[in-house]
Image (tube, helix red, strand yellow):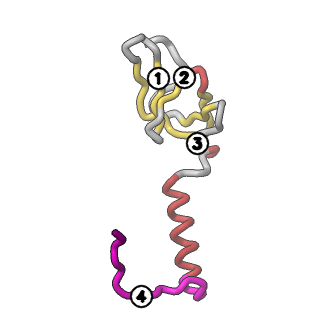
Amino acid sequence: MDEIDIKVGDYVVYINTGTKGRVVDIRKDENGDIWVVLDNNLMYRPHLLRVIDKSKITERKEDIDEVVEELEKEELEEGKVMDLDLGDACGAG
């Protein structure tokens, strides 16, 4: 592979959209083009990525799921959300 400044395990940002992630693989396709695979399973050309400090990664799916779960728990405890039994549901059609 051609020499690139990105390696597996690096944290990078895609300069066009700000998408951030961890590099899980670097591949060369049948045309000889190099692609960097991030932990979001998307592939990017290396010249459009910049290596960043891991602390810059703030929105991770696991973190978001954890925050949503905590908010739901708080709302249930405060009585903002009620658990209702609406009886048997039936399918349409």
Residue 61 appears left or right of 85: right
Q: Amino acid at mark 2?
A: Pro
Residue at image point 51% right, 70% down: 69
First along the sequence among labels 4 and 2: 2
Asked whether the beta carbons under mark 2 and mark 1 sit within 8 Å of each other, the answer is yes
Disc 1: which residue: 35
- Report helix, strand or loop for mark 2: helix
Residue at image point 60% right, 46% down: 57
- Report helix, strand or loop for mark 4: loop
Residue 34 appears left or right of 93: right
Q: Position of residue 90 (x, y in %)?
A: 34, 78
> In the image, is residue 19 above or below residue 28?
below
Image depth: mark 1 or mark 3 in front: 1
- Report helix, strand or loop for mark 3: helix
Q: Position of residue 63 (x, y in %)?
A: 53, 58
Check residue 46 in the rendering and tell me which mark sits there, or answer none: 2
Quarter placement of the N terminus: top left
- The residue carrying pointer 3 sits among few (fewer than 14), some (14 to 19) or many (20 or more) residues within 10 Å by Cα, namely few
* Residue 28 belongs to the span the image colors magenta: no
Asked whether the beta carbons under mark 3 and mark 2 sit within 8 Å of each other, the answer is no
> In the image, is residue 89 above or below residue 62?
below
Disc 3: which residue: 54
Q: How far, Cα to Cα, is label 3 from label 4?
A: 45 Å
Image depth: mark 1 or mark 4 in front: 4
Residue at image point 53% right, 78% down: 73
Q: Amino acid at mark 1?
A: Trp
Give 76 or 70, whichever is nearer the viewer.
76
Asked whether the beta carbons under mark 4 and mark 2 sit within 8 Å of each other, the answer is no
Disc 4: which residue: 85
